[in-house]
Amino acid sequence: MDDSLKGSGTKALGKRAILIAGPTASGKSALALSLAKSLNGVIINADSMQLYRDLRVVSARPSAEEEAEVPHRLYGVLPASTAFSTGAWLRLAAGELQAAGDAGRLPILIGGTGLYFKGLTEGFADMPEVPDAIRAEARDLADREGIEGLRRELAARGDEETAARLGDPQRLARALEVLMATGTPLARWQSAHQSEPLLAAEMCQRVVLAPPRPWLHERIARRAELMLSEEGIAEVRALLERHLPATLPAMRAIGVPEIGAFLAGKADRAETIHRLTVATRQYAKRQETWFRNQMGDWQRVDPSDEINLDRFQRLS
């Protein structure tokens, strides 16, 4: 982990903040804008796809007009050619939290990337750089022998604990990469490189937007239409014309492969809208599951009802 995060903790950064998580299309941006206006706040992006400047429409970033109403930070700050980690986001977020405190503004962090919020309030162990050859070797083993092959290799190299604990092939492959690159089992690496939280959980108002499923699905359907607007199509066309590697996060963003197929004549408009809607619904469901399992002590708020902003006034 970068030394800029080690030991920073809540003493160096502002102790008050509002954290708003929630599935895609649940109204996080509108709530944050209202709060920032009433509480002298600055909005800090905690959504991995909204970091990319190439995808304003496709990722549903706030409009230029909304961004001009109150300070917005960490939106559209990366080119699509960049692969970005949670640790890298935390380093940027640490600077923005410090700047908000220096300016006397309340930081309001919003997004749908749960790991960002976990890192903020619980600390985070960044993964080491792994040479491409080692990554390819681990992924090839995963493709050939699956979960059991990865477990056997981890155990043979001395990391029986991780082999027994993990059941996801991607996480097992990542653990093998770390072991091969550093000679250190994953759990030991994480323990040695764990950063302190940037914000104390008890000093933050932590909210997860939890809308009724029909309400959220209606909003997702409207978002699919916006993604296939002229502006959304133009974004994807420009991105695809750069011929970037398909493995980059921006190239896998919901909307890019679906609209890419539309541009290639492989799907008509109706089919593309359907694909966008289904992909977004599936993503929202995965987010909701993650928030429920990993952020169970956060306050749940139903955005389909009018949210009383007075509940946030105590932080102003």
Image: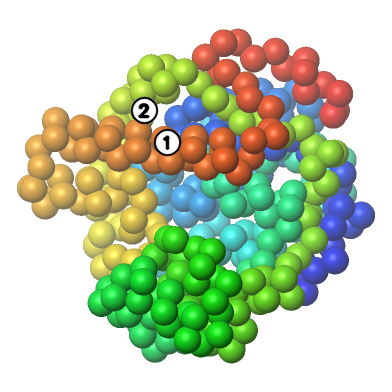
Q: Are marks 2 and 1 in contact (CB under 8 Å)?
A: yes
Q: Quadrant of residue 272?
A: top left
Tell which of 243 and 200 is nearer to you: 200
Tell which of 208 and 152 is nearer to you: 152
Q: Can see residue 226? A: no
Tell me what residue is drawn at x 68 percent, y 76 percent.
Answer: 188
| Residue 13 % position (x, y) | 85, 53
Q: Which mark is residue 220?
A: 2
| Foreground tag (2 vs 1) | 1
Q: Is residue 83 positioned above or below 269 on the image?
A: below
Q: Quadrant of residue 31?
A: top right
Q: Is residue 221 left or right of residue 290?
A: left
Residue annotated with mark 1: 284
Tell which of 249 and 229 is nearer to you: 249
Q: Secondary structure at mark 2?
A: helix
| Residue 253 % position (x, y) | 36, 51
Tell me what residue is drawn at x 57 percent, y 40 percent.
Answer: 293
Q: CA distance from mark 2 to mark 1?
A: 9 Å
Q: Is residue 213 positioned above or below 135 on the image?
A: above
